[in-house]
Amino acid sequence: MADNGVVLSKAAIDLGIVARNGQAMLTFYRDILGFVEEPSTPFHAGGVMYRLWCGDSLIKIVVPEDPPANSAQPGPVESASGIRYWTMRVSNLEEIMVTCANAGATVVVPVTEIRAGVTIGMVEDPDGNWVEFVTYSE
């Protein structure tokens, strides 16, 4: 590693998602996907930050007092630049996809083997962000 590279103090990331539909987003990530909620905190610019654990990663759902004027470009991964989706490696892909579909989430990529030993599924959260689940057969 280069001398100026990142030296992690935690083997995971924290991800911030600014939400227009705060309660629906909280329900999706906490109740449907089963992320573990810890106490929310005030957001520095006004509003609230819900803090949810996905393994060692902290997913922060930020709900500003005033909804943002702009939304991220919705649609397929290849339709715009920027962060288009995020991925979780899982061992119960089919179950997750059924649970999400039964809860009303839009399935954007059904369970699909994309190459030998790699199977994915993708859903859209209530604000239109894409979430990918991947399983590797070993």
Image (tube, rainbow, N blue to C red):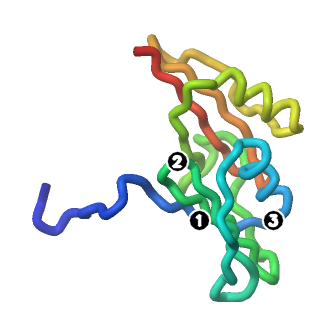
Circles 3 and 1: CB distance less than 8 Å? no
Q: Residue at x 66, y 20 (%)?
A: 111
At label 3, which amino acid type do we have? Answer: Gly
Residue with the mark numbered 2: 55
* Quadrant of the image containing the C terminus: top left
Looking at the image, is mark 2 or mark 1 nearer the viewer?
A: 2
Residue with the mark numbered 3: 22
Q: Is residue 1 above or below residue 49?
A: above
Residue with the mark numbered 1: 16
Q: CA distance from mark 3 to mark 1?
A: 13 Å
Looking at the image, is mark 2 or mark 3 nearer the viewer?
A: 2
At label 2, which amino acid type do we have? Answer: Gly
The picture places residue 47, in percent across and down from the top left corner, at 75, 82
73 left or right, relative to 53: right
Circles 2 and 1: CB distance less than 8 Å? no
The picture places residue 32, in percent across and down from the top left corner, at 78, 43
Residue closer to the observer: 123 or 60: 60
The picture places residue 38, in percent across and down from the top left corner, at 65, 65
Q: Residue at x 72, y 50 (%)?
A: 29
Q: Earlier in the sequence, mark 2 or mark 1?
A: 1
Q: Is residue 132 above or below residue 86?
A: above
Q: Secondary structure at mark 2?
A: loop
Q: Is residue 14 above or below residue 80?
A: below
Residue placed farthest to the top in the image? 116
